[in-house]
Image: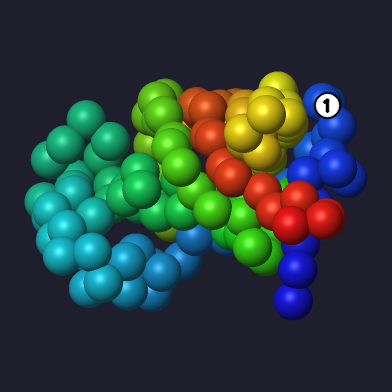
Amino acid sequence: MQGLYFEELSVGQSAEITRVVGAADIKAFAEVSGDVNPVHLDDAYARTTPFGERIAHGMLAAAYVSAVLGTTLPGPGAIYLSQSLRFRRPVKIGDAVTARVTVKALDDKRGHVTCDTVCEVGGKTVVDGEAVVMVTRRDA
């Protein structure tokens, strides 16, 4: 299975997915990552924080960006080279997170694609940043 080739990409092209974050997602992410911070897992503890309730791991929301890059734009075969992230707002249980990737620049010489990345809940940015991926050329 092959995603888009470098030659099929253009500046401004974008793709997105939306996922609803459930308590089971947070638990599974904690188990896989080893991040068992009680703000994510313990209701009583989370109530004592400025958030007042459990929140998802920031990296869980950021993982949805990876899902877009690896499945849609550019898709299968793309290789993640870097990702900057800014965590703007918390993601809570039940939030619908929309992750969007937009092609910002194409480096023809290296076959690298720079993308703006953003995750939003209710139209508000929760995570944003920039990704660089390497993409296969059609004639490679």
Q: Position of residue 120 (x, y in %)?
A: 60, 36
Q: Describe the element under mark 1 as helix, strand or loop.
A: loop
Dot 1: few (<14), some (14–19), or many (≥20) neighbours within 10 Å? few
- Residue 106 at x, y = what percent? 72, 27
Residue located at (67% from left, 29% from top): 109
Judging depth in this view, the residue of 50 and 57 nearest the camera is 57
Which scheme is used to colour this image of the protein? rainbow
- At a point 53% along the width and 28% down the height, the residue shown is 130
Q: Nearer the viewer, residue 71 or 82?
A: 82
Compared with 21, 74 (above or below) is above
Q: Which residue is mark 1?
A: 12
Q: Residue at x 35, y 43 (%)?
A: 58
At horizontal 46% and vertical 66% (from top left) the residue drawn is 22
Q: Is residue 72 visible?
A: no
Image-based side of 117 in relation to 100, left or right? left
The quarter of the image holding the C terminus is: bottom right
Figure disc tally: 1
Along the line of sight, the residue nearer the viewer: 22 or 76: 76
In the image, 134: left or right of 17? left
Residue 68 pos. (x, y %):
65, 53
Dividing the image into 4 quarters, which one contains the N terminus?
bottom right
Q: Is residue 100 left or right of residue 81?
A: right
Q: What amino acid is found at the position of numbered circle 1 in the picture?
A: Gly
Q: In the picture, residue 29 is in which quadrant?
A: bottom left
Q: Is residue 49 visible?
A: yes
Q: Residue 42's spot in the image, x, y percent?
A: 16, 60
